[in-house]
Amino acid sequence: MSEFQIQYLQFLWPPRDEPLLHLDVKSFGSLSQISVDLCSLLYGGLIEILDRGNHANPIEELMVKYQVNFEYLKNRLLSSTNFLNLSAVTSNSESSWFGFSLVLKESSGVKPNDLVNFVNQNEIGLRLLFAGNLTKQPSISERNYPVSGELTNTYVTIHQTFSLGTLPELGSVQTDYTPEKLEEFF
């Protein structure tokens, strides 16, 4: 998805009743590039043209907004890749991203608890990913079950993998705040 397409879909959220004017999109680039990107969104089913203006399709609005926020966070957090592994979409897939996963690199020199405390102090919703070595989860730690191998990579998933929300209600102010604070921390 191009930067224009992300900005355009953000512009359409929430749905507007007024028509989209040239003045509304002139900062997005040349008219020819805007036309190409709008056609791509239209033929991809992400927008529809109505008499009163363009709207994201109601059925796909939420999914699109999640994806827009995911892409925005991914691009905005590139400055922190010395410390974090960022989520990536696998090739030939279309995922609905309800959260943006971050893995704190062991080489970062940062303790996971320090990161969690910092983001909590700055009122950022960061959650540990509930996955990894499920044998360490309290609900099944007392049960008897077979284990195959040492499960060495699960430590990273349990202790160093976090998820940031990509809620549709998040606007550019909120989606900018999180990367700014993470850059400040690192």
Image (cartoon, rainbow, N blue to C red):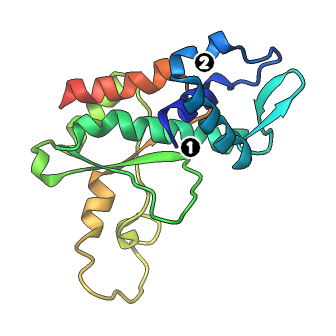
Taking 12 as reference, is 18 above or below it? above
Place of residue 186 in the rendered image (x, y in percent of width and height, measured from the top left): 17, 32
Q: CA distance from mark 1 to mark 2?
A: 21 Å
Q: Which residue type does callout 1 highlight?
A: Gln
Going 30% across and 37% down the picture, which residue do you hit? 116
* Among numbered discs 1 and 2, the one appearing first in the sequence: 2
Q: Is residue 123 visible?
A: no
Q: List the residue tagged with mark 2.
A: 25
Taking 111 as reference, is 92 above or below it? below
Q: Which residue type does callout 2 highlight?
A: Val
Proximity of marks 1 and 2: CB atoms separated by less than 8 Å: no
Q: List the residue tagged with mark 1.
A: 67
In the image, taking residue 92 as reference, residue 35 lies left or right, namely right
Going 41% across and 23% down the picture, which residue do you hit? 176
Place of residue 170 in the rendered image (x, y in percent of width and height, measured from the top left): 56, 27
Label count reads 2
Going 62% across and 33% down the picture, which residue do you hit? 168
Crowding around mark 2 (Cα neighbors within 10 Å: few <14, some 14 to 19, many 20+) is: some
Residue reaching furthest to the front: 32
**Residue 112, quarter of picture:** top left
Q: Nearer the observer, disc 1 or disc 2?
A: 2
Q: Nearer the viewer, residue 170 or 117?
A: 170
